Image: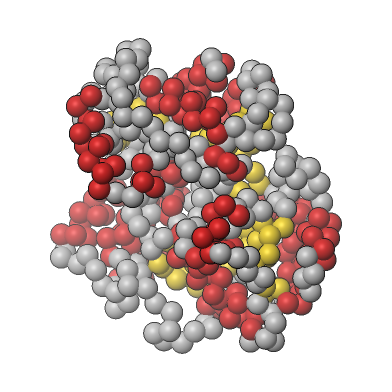
Amino acid sequence: MATREFPLVPKEVERIQTPYRRIQTPIPVPESIPILENLRASEPRSMGGQPPIIWSGGDGCVIRDSYGNQWIDFSSGVLVTGSGHGHPKIVEAIQKTAGQGLYHAYCFPTEIRARLTSKLESLLPEPLSRVFLVTTGSEATECAIKLARTYGLRSHDSKKILVTFENAFHGRTMGSQLAGGSPALKSWVGQDNPDFVQIPYPDGFRCPDTSFDVFIDTLARKGVDPSDVCGVMSETYQGCNACLMPVEYAKALRKWCDENGAVLIFDEVQAGFGRTGALFGFEHYGIAPDMACFGKGISGGMPLSAVAGTDELMSLYGPGEMTSTHSANPICAAAALANIEIIVDGGLVENARALEPVLLDAGKKIMADSNGRIGRADGAGLVMALQFVQPNTTTPDPEAAFEVVARSIEKGVMLFAPVGIGGGAIKINPPLLITEQILREGLDVIAEVVAGL
């Protein structure tokens, strides 16, 4: 499932000048080629999958290079900068903490860690009462897997099966990829692990049957005894399709986990902190998980993630038995606290909810005008996925998706490279503080590009 590499050949493109978009050079910029070539020569090939634009600055909803070009940012740096780029409160928090000479503290107590964990605990619904701060989304999901299996094994030796969903993505470390639902991403492991079982995700597209019967029937077909399931983990919305599960399905899943003594985990790494028009994505379901994993949008740009859980689950390991070298790095913690306050107090959750119809209505129109090239446009709040397919099928078309990204970049809209099943999905997820005017301008560009395929 390799991503196509963007060519490092400057191309003459239309010059663009609007209040938010500015393209003044060929793309990629000729002067930037030596830097891009140096990166490709010194880094793994895997780092070369994004558009050949050298980011040098940003402000709110826009990204700039050093050559006079500016883009409306529909990437949020892969769903991270919910409060926008260069927010003065986050910059101030970072500078103030660094100015104290404290930029690392391991697990030694700090006031900023106490403030951040208290803030998170105050926002989370019961029974989520404890927070473990770590560094990456993968580290958070690994921790949740560990706690669910530890909890299950204390019941009996066979209660160690983790149920996840097909096409899910939970990270790039070994445990998180075993839990993931893409066989191609875990082929390096060498064989299927019977302790990780995948179920079709009720997206209504590649799995038309969205009833909970599919969950029960699949477990039975795979020979899984419900009493052996230690936990069920799902992305709150699947990253590859930006699709929330039906509310009735989520409630049935909560009930099934309660009846079978399984831990329910929502991976909120993409969905958390306002992205879906709710502070936490699982709020759409009217239920609470036993654990939730957060990352990306939690800090506004600094490497920090978190696992929230019940008192029972988060107390399974004693002092010193579950730690992380950079847990709640003081600078990252300060940035995260500032970011959360901006999102909560600045009305960014409400803004995402208010702009959802604008985003989704545009997606439906782009899909309708795609001549069958887009099979599904789905999302919530300020995240939407356009799933490019071979015309009028469900077979992914990564080439079409790639071309839309490349042409959008040339017209001043920043997207990240195609993701999802076979790389056929384009995600649109601008900073949560975007205005309707800027959102519509960017969407009009994508609509023009798709119509021109």
Residue 393, placed above or below residue 92: above
Inspect this view and state whether residue 351 appears.
no
Inspect this view and state whether residue 390 appears.
yes
| x and y percentages locating residue 159 in the rendered image | 69, 80
Q: Is residue 162 left or right of residue 91?
A: right
The residue lying toward the viewer, choosing from 325 and 26, is 26
Q: Quadrant of the C terminus?
A: top right
Instruction: Name the residue at 46% across, 29% down.
Output: 405
> In terms of image quadrants, where is residue 69?
top left
The residue lying toward the viewer, choosing from 30 and 332, is 30
> In terms of image quadrants, where is residue 119?
bottom left
Residue 142, placed above or below residue 45: below
Residue 391, placed above or below residue 106: above
| x and y percentages locating residue 56 in the rendered image | 24, 36
Instruction: Name the residue at 60% across, 65% down.
Output: 191
Residue furthest front as drawn: 190
Instruction: Name the residue at 19% across, 59% down.
Output: 98
| x and y percentages locating residue 291 in the rendered image | 58, 67
Q: Is residue 128 left or right of residue 119?
A: right
Residue furthest top as drawn: 14
Task: Describe the colour scheme in one phrase.
Answer: secondary structure
| x and y percentages locating residue 192 in the rendered image | 63, 65
Instruction: Name the residue at 72% across, 58% down.
Output: 199
Q: Is residue 244 left or right of residue 338?
A: right
